[in-house]
Image: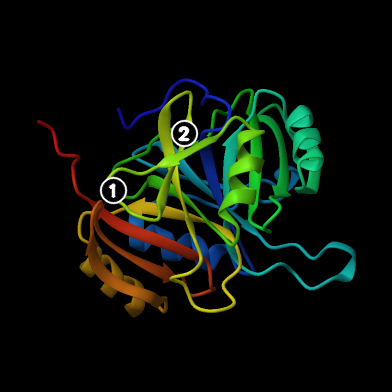
Amino acid sequence: MPEVTRPYEPGVPCWVDLMVPDQQAALDFYRDLFGWQGEIGPAENGGYAVCSLNGKAVAGIMTAMSPDDQPPPPPAWTTYLASADVDASAQAISKHGGAVRTPAMDVLTLGRMAVASDPTGAVFGLWHAKDFIGSQLVNEPGTVIWSELDTSDLDAATAFYSALGVETAPMDGAPDYFALQVAGRTIGGMQGLDKMPEGTPSHWLTYFSVDDTDSTVDALTRAGGSVLIPPFDMVAGRMAVVKDPQGGLFAVINARPPETG
């Protein structure tokens, strides 16, 4: 079912958000691209905007902040993994070679969060749900359908995420690609950086489902976005890797239903 009503299992991607210099421009762009509804939030919540589709929360957009007079971070989508105990997860991250970038903190009564990076530098978040479970709609056009770790060191990443309850296994029908699994269920993918441009850092890549990859990419470029990998057919469907006008990286895919038989 694409609608999610219960908290996600620990280790499962449960939310994504975008940090950009111009929050309103991003809200307008993704409204036109995916049909999202959202507005700048109240000051007490840092203006954080929860975007919805068909009345269900699908993603967040916020303004990039500059801590201690430092340059603001580059535009980026962040994947959050569900956690039963953010503080314990943060300790495990530090113990196994990662780094906690934003210490654990409460977000009103919504939940408890932290932001960290794995030993290869890929940034991700942690979310312990209280009043807000995270993505309420997934796996349909305009929502998250896949989360992928692109890493410079497969062995180091495998060991690290295992400590967070996320295991790795070969992906059937996809050489050099690995399934990320929680309790035996595939919840994402992982691959190396060998097929990517030299200098590409480790990162988590968010895939959004679309009805038509080519027309979505056309609309994105007309709105000022850019294309890193043009639409192509692969085992899971037709996909492309793109950037929004402010530089936020993501993928779009018209996924092919799994074969049965």
State which mark lies toward you, 1 or 2: 2
- What residue does disc 2 label? 181
Depth check, front residue: 154 or 116: 154
Q: CA distance from mark 1 to mark 2?
A: 23 Å
Relative horizontal placement of residue 251, taking residue 99 as reference (left or right) = left
User: Taking 154 as reference, is 112 left or right?
Assistant: right
User: Which of 14/220 is in front?
Assistant: 14
The answer to whether residue 48 of the structure is visible from this angle is no
Q: Quadrant of residue 19?
A: bottom right
The part of the image, by quadrant, that contains residue 81 is top right
Q: Secondary structure at mark 2?
A: strand
Q: Amino acid at mark 1?
A: Pro
Crowdedness near tag 2: few (<14), some (14–19) or many (≥20) residues, C-alpha within 10 Å: some
Local packing at callout 1 (Cα closer than 10 Å; few below 14, some 14-19, many 20+) is many
Name the image quarter holding residue 252: bottom left
Residue visible at 41% across and 76% down?
Answer: 228
Q: Residue at x 84, y 62 (%)?
A: 67
Q: Earlier in the sequence, mark 1 or mark 2?
A: 1
Q: Residue at x 75, y 43 (%)?
A: 44
- At x 63%, y 56%, the residue is 122
Which residue is outermost to the left?
261
Q: Is residue 119 above or below residue 246?
A: above
Estimate the x, y position of residue 167 in percent, counting from the top left: 53, 34
Amino acid type indicated by mark 2: Gln
The residue where tag 1 is placed is: 141
Up/down of 126 relative to 211, above or below: above
Q: Position of residue 50 (x, y in %)?
A: 54, 44
Asked if the residues shown at circle 1 and circle 2 are in contact, with their CB atoms under 8 angstroms apart, the answer is: no
